C-alpha cells in the first residue's frame, strides 16, 4: 500500500486527496486551514501536525499550493526529510521557472519529481476526471501516472522539467481569450435582438464552436450545467483565471513571444477582479462586457 503525503487540502487538493483514499491509498495530509483539514479528515485523510510529519513516512508527496514561492518553500523543507526514492509531484499552477527550480531541489538529492498541473476545476477534482499535464523525466512520469490516474482521466507527458506548467499556462490563456470572445458574441447578439438559444444552436455546431461555448456557455439556458445558471458561482474563479493570465504574460515576456490577445484578456480579467468579482466564475466576465455588475 502506497503512503501519500498531500500538502494543500483546499478546494482542489481536498477532493483530490479524498479520491486517493477511495483508491485504497493511505493519505496523510496537511493544510494551514482548519476548515480544509476538517473536510479532508471527513474524506478519510489522516491529518498530520505539520507538513514534515506528513512527508516523513511517505512514498509519494503531492503538493497543491497557491503560488511558486509556496511550492519552493515546501519542497525545500520536505526534500531533506523525505525517504530515499520518494516521488515528488506538484499539481499547483505556478510559473515555469519555479517549476524548474523545484525539480532541481528534488534532483539535487536524487529524488524523482514531476510537475503535474491540472485542468478540470473543482468538478473534475471531485469527480476524479481531471486532466494532468506533466513535465519531468520519463521514469518519474511512469511512477507518477498510476497515482494521477486515481485523480484524473487524462494524463499527458508534455516533456521535461516545467513542460507541464508550460502546457497549463498556454491552455488557460486560450481558455481566457475564448471565453471573452464567446461573451462578446452573446452581448452583440443581445444588442441585435437575437435569441441566445438561437445563437448557441448555430455557433455550437458551426465554426464558432469551442469549449467556452459548448460546455461552459456564459449565459443561462443553453448549457444547464454552466455557472451562468447558478449566479456565476465557481467553477473556476475569476481570481484564478487572472492569476493564470498573468502567468501567461510573464512567460510570454520571458520567452519573447507576442501574445496581444492574451495581454488584452489579462487586462479585462484584471478589471473584472477590480469590480469585486474575483470570487465569481470567470465566465461572469460577460457582465463586465455588458457594463453591468
Image (cartoon, rainbow, N blue to C red):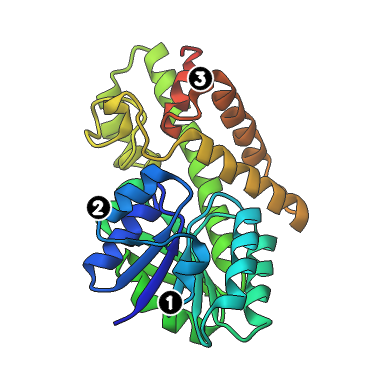
Q: CA distance from mark 2 to mark 1?
A: 21 Å
Q: Which residue is mark 3?
A: 288
Q: CA distance from mark 3 to mark 1?
A: 46 Å
Screen quadrant of the N terminus:
bottom left
Closer to us: 97 or 42: 42
Q: Is residue 81 above or below residue 210?
A: below
Q: Position of residue 222 (x, y in %)?
A: 24, 30
Q: Is residue 275 above or below residue 266?
A: above
Q: Is residue 156 above or below residue 63?
A: below
User: Residue at image x 61%, y 55%?
Assistant: 70
Closer to us: 29 or 263: 29
Q: Would you call the spot at circle 1 few (<14 residues within 10 Å), some (14-19), or many (20 or more)?
A: many
- Residue 84 in the figure: left or right of residue 252: left
Which mark, residue 91? none
Q: CA distance from mark 3 to mark 2?
A: 39 Å
Q: Are marks 2 and 1 in contact (CB under 8 Å)?
A: no
User: Residue at image x 52%, y 40%?
Assistant: 241
Q: Earlier in the sequence, mark 3 or mark 2?
A: 2
User: Residue at image x 66%, y 74%?
Assistant: 105
Q: How many marks?
A: 3
Q: Position of residue 83 (x, y in %)?
A: 51, 83
Q: Would you call the spot at circle 2 few (<14 residues within 10 Å), some (14-19), or many (20 or more)?
A: few
Q: Earlier in the sequence, mark 3 or mark 1?
A: 1
Q: Position of residue 110 (x, y in %)?
A: 62, 86
- Residue 124 in the figure: left or right of residue 166: left
User: Residue at image x 50%, y 63%?
Assistant: 51
Secondary structure, mark 2, is helix
Nearer the camera: disc 3 or disc 2: 2
Q: Which residue is mark 1?
A: 58
Q: Which residue is mark 2?
A: 42
Nearer the camera: disc 3 or disc 1: 1
Q: Earlier in the sequence, mark 2 or mark 1?
A: 2
Amino acid at each position: 500500500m502506497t503512503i501519500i503525503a498531500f500538502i494543500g487540502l483546499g478546494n482542489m487538493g481536498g477532493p483530490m486527496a479524498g479520491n486517493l483514499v477511495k483508491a485504497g491509498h493511505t493519505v496523510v495530509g496537511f493544510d494551514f486551514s482548519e476548515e480544509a483539514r476538517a473536510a479532508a479528515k471527513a474524506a478519510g485523510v489522516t491529518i498530520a501536525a505539520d507538513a514534515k510529519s506528513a512527508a516523513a513516512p511517505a512514498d509519494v508527496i503531492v503538493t497543491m499550493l497557491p503560488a511558486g514561492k509556496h511550492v519552493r518553500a515546501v519542497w525545500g523543507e520536505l526534500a531533506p526529510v523525505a525517504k530515499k526514492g520518494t516521488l515528488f509531484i506538484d499539481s499547483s499552477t505556478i510559473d515555469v521557472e519555479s517549476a524548474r527550480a523545484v525539480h532541481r531541489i528534488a534532483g539535487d538529492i536524487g529524488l524523482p519529481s514531476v510537475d503535474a498541473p491540472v485542468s478540470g476545476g473543482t468538478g473534475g477534482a471531485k469527480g476524479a476526471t481531471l486532466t494532468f499535464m506533466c513535465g519531468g523525466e520519463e521514469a518519474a512520469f511512469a511512477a507518477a501516472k498510476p497515482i494521477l490516474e486515481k485523480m484524473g482521466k487524462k494524463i499527458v507527458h508534455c516533456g521535461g522539467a516545467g513542460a507541464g506548467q508550460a502546457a497549463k499556462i498556454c491552455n488557460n490563456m486560450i481558455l481566457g481569450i475564448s471565453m471573452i470572445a464567446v461573451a462578446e458574441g452573446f452581448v452583440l447578439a443581445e444588442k441585435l435582438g437575437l435569441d441566445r438559444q438561437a445563437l448557441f444552436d448555430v455557433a455550437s455546431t458551426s465554426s464558432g464552436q469551442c469549449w467556452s461555448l459548448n460546455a461552459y456557455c456564459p449565459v443561462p439556458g443553453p448549457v444547464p450545467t454552466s455557472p451562468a445558471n447558478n449566479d456565476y458561482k465557481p467553477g473556476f474563479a475569476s481570481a484564478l483565471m487572472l492569476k493564470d493570465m498573468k502567468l501567461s504574460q510573464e512567460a510570454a515576456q520571458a520567452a519573447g513571444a507576442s501574445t496581444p490577445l492574451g495581454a488584452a484578456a489579462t487586462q479585462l480579467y484584471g478589471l473584472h477582479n477590480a469590480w469585486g468579482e474575483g470570487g465569481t466564475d470567470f465566465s461572469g466576465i460577460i457582465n463586465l462586457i455588458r457594463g453591468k455588475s
